[in-house]
Image (cartoon, rainbow, N blue to C red):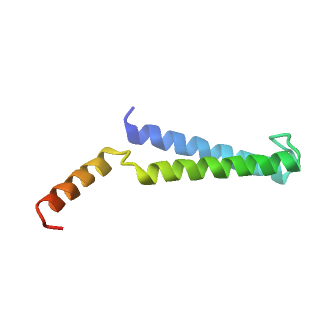
């Protein structure tokens, strides 16, 4: 299984889970039995986790493509072209 097929399957499963959750919530069934304070804490923690991941990803060259671009820029700067 190549990477594109694997990513497609993962995205599709996440989408199905989100739709199932939304349908259950609209029918009044709580898939996650938590109270209002628990929901607030969960949302706050999720936002903090997403912000952390975004900042880490944004400030670091994680992918091969990003590292290659960084090398090209460094080379061009060294040669005085930038």
Q: Position of residue 77 (x, y in %)?
A: 18, 61
Q: Residue at 64%, 45% (x, y): give it.
A: 16
Residue 58 vertical position relative to residue 30 in the rendered view, above or below: below
Viewer-nearest residue: 82 or 38:
82
Left/right placement of residue 19 relative to residue 73 reads: right
In which quadrant is the C terminus drawn? bottom left
Left/right placement of residue 12 relative to residue 40 reads: left
Q: Residue at 37%, 35% (x, y): give it.
A: 2
Residue 64 occupies quadrant:
top left
* Residue farthest toward the left in the current orientation of the protein: 79
Q: Residue at 77%, 50% (x, y): give it.
A: 23
Q: Position of residue 45 (x, y in %)?
A: 70, 47
Q: Residue at 80%, 51% (x, y): give it.
A: 40
In which quadrant is the N terminus drawn? top left
Residue 32 vertical position relative to residue 22 in the rendered view, above or below: above
Q: Position of residue 59 (x, y in %)?
A: 42, 53
Residue 73 occupies quadrant:
bottom left
Q: Position of residue 81 (x, y in %)?
A: 13, 67
Left/right placement of residue 49 relative to residue 80 reads: right
């Amino acid at each position: 299984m190549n990477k594109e097929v694997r990513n497609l399957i993962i995205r599709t499963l996440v989408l199905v889970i989100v739709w199932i959750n939304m349908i259950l919530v609209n029918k009044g069934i709580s898939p996650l039995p938590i109270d209002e304070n628990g929901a607030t804490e969960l949302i706050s923690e999720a936002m903090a986790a997403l912000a952390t991941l975004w900042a880490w990803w944004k400030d670091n060259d994680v992918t091969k493509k990003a590292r290659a671009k960084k090398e090209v820029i460094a080379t061009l700067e060294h040669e005085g072209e930038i």
